[in-house]
Image: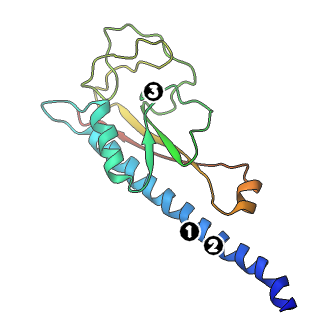
Amino acid sequence: MVEFALVAPLLLLLMFGIIDFGRVIYTYVTLNQAVNEGARVAIRDSPLLPTNAAVEAAVKVHAVDVVLANPCPNGPITSAAPPANQGWIYITEPDPPTTPEALSPTLEDAPGGEPWANARGSCSATNPAHAHAPLQVTIYYNFVPFTPLIRQVTANNIIISAAATYSTEY
């Protein structure tokens, strides 16, 4: 019993660490699939060009068991961490600026079909995509492990990021 009392905490830590590692891999693969599907929706040529809402909906459909939001869909991409076990979706040009872009309200957001709607001034406006411009769909996800020791070591967050960049068809 003494040997079990000494070894059991290590075995439990190892077992739950393996479970958390599996959860991280599952989340990472899910997010990669979701950004690829979102980017495919963002670039398609159709009579009604895709909007931010259409891209966000495609990402959310393919992000099974993952909670995603869209605070500023066209950026700027902030360095702040999303809430625990939640993610943020961004639809931008590749390598977007880290500060809001000041563009005229007559311009449109990426990917192409949605009017400029971020009048708050805290979100970026992006020129409408055209002439095979590249678009990038990015997700930043704040993964919180459920193993207490691993949670303490990681300071309650592991930021998982996934991005896909495709050229538009229009």
**Is residue 7 at least partly visible in the picture?**
yes
Instruction: Tell me the colour scheme of the image.
Output: rainbow
Badge 1 amino acid: Gly
In the picture provided, is 29 more to the left or to the right than 56? right
CB under 8 Å between callouts 3 and 1?
A: no
Badge 2 amino acid: Ile
Q: Which mark is residue 72?
A: 3
Q: CA distance from mark 3 to mark 1?
A: 30 Å
Q: Can you name the residue that lies furthest to the left here?
A: 47
Badge 3 amino acid: Cys
Label 1 CA crowd tier, 10 Å (few <14, some 14–19, many 20+):
few
Q: Which mark is residue 152?
A: none
Where is mark 2, residue-wise?
18
Q: What is the secondary structure assignment of the residue under circle 2? A: helix
Q: Residue at x 46, y 29 (%)?
A: 71
Q: What is the secondary structure assignment of the residue under circle 1? A: helix
Q: 89 above or below 100? A: below
Identify the mark nearer the N-term, 3 or 2.
Answer: 2
Where is mark 1, residue-wise?
22
Q: What is the secondary structure assignment of the residue under circle 3? A: loop
Q: 92 above or below 35? A: above
Quadrant holding the C terminus? top left
Q: CA distance from mark 2 to mark 1?
A: 6 Å
Q: Can you name the residue that lies furthest to the front here?
A: 1
**Is residue 42 at least partly visible in the picture?**
no
Identify the mark nearer the N-term, 3 or 1.
Answer: 1
Kindly indicate the quadrant of the structure image that contains residue 129: top left
CB under 8 Å between callouts 2 and 1?
A: yes
Kindly indicate the quadrant of the structure image that contains residue 80: top right
Measuring from the top left, give residue 79's x and y in whole percent. 62, 33
